[in-house]
Image (spheres, helix red, strand yellow):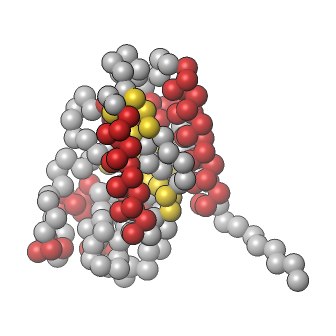
């Protein structure tokens, strides 16, 4: 059984989202290396500070408390990483200030669009936001130009070049997440 739990967050709520197809393909390629869970975001409310306490049920159940990304070892449900937050049950992803679910999480960002520029611009912005939240964003960029028959409904990638890119991407992420999840012994030479 894989030792690293990963929350997969797809930014599109569309049922036939091309980014959801890409995410399913990555989960399939990570089989045996990561335990992946998809996080639902379609029922999360627009941010409103008035909703921080009490936390809306959709937030508490779907993504920011007991389930998914706050308790994932790494993000692309186990015990939560210590974010220094004494309000573990009252977090709203990035709120309240100084108490967010992203601190110290290893994050891989990848996306697809019919043209490469759409996902490139979106990824650049997401990297900036996650950096400000003190997430550990994996280096390297992966932009996939989506074509109608690139990924089938089972997550099989038809193009061998794209398959190699995706396999390399998910292997790099799995390796990094495993290294940062495993307890370490440090040796200091004087």
Q: Residue furthest right?
A: 190
Residue 85 screen position, x and y as percent: 38, 79
Q: Which quadrant of the figure has residue 77?
A: bottom left
Q: Which quadrant of the figure has residue 57?
A: bottom left
Residue 165 screen position, x and y as percent: 55, 32
Total numbered circles: 0
Q: Is residue 126 left or right of residue 13?
A: right
44, above or below 119, in the image: below
At x 30% / y 68%, what residue is drawn? 94
- Give 188 or 5, whichever is nearer the viewer: 188
- Give 33 or 131, whichever is nearer the viewer: 131
Q: Is residue 43 left or right of residue 1?
A: left
- Give 187 or 135, whichever is nearer the viewer: 135
Q: Which quadrant of the figure has residue 125?
A: bottom left
156, above or below 109, in the image: above
187, above or below 77, in the image: below
Residue 87 screen position, x and y as percent: 32, 79
Q: Is residue 80 visible?
A: no
The quarter of the image holding the N terminus is top right
At x 41% / y 57%, what residue is drawn? 127
At x 26% / y 54%, what residue is drawn? 62
Q: Is residue 190 left or right of residue 30?
A: right
The quarter of the image holding the C terminus is bottom right
149, above or below 104, in the image: above
At x 50% / y 45%, what residue is drawn? 141
Residue 114 screen position, x and y as percent: 32, 28
Q: Is residue 177 visible?
A: yes
Q: Residue furthest front?
A: 117
């Amino acid at each position: 059984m894989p030792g690293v739990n990963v929350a997969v967050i797809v930014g599109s709520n569309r049922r036939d989202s091309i980014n959801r197809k890409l995410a399913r393909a990555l989960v399939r390629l990570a089989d045996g290396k990561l335990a992946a869970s998809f996080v639902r975001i379609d029922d999360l409310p627009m941010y409103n500070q008035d909703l921080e306490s009490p936390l809306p049920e959709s937030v508490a159940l779907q993504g920011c408390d007991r389930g998914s990304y706050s308790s994932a070892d790494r993000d692309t449900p186990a015990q939560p990483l210590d974010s220094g937050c004494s309000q573990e049950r009252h977090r709203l992803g990035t709120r309240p200030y100084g108490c967010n679910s992203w601190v110290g999480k290893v994050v891989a960002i990848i996306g697809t669009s019919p043209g490469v520029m759409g996902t490139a611009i979106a990824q650049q912005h997401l990297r900036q936001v996650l950096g400000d939240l003190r997430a550990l964003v994996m280096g390297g960029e992966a932009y996939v130009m989506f074509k109608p028959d690139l990924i089938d409904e089972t997550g099989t990638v038809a193009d061998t070049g794209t398959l190699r890119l995706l396999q390399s991407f998910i292997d790099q992420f799995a390796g990094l997440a495993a290294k940062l999840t495993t307890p370490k012994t440090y040796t200091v030479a004087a």
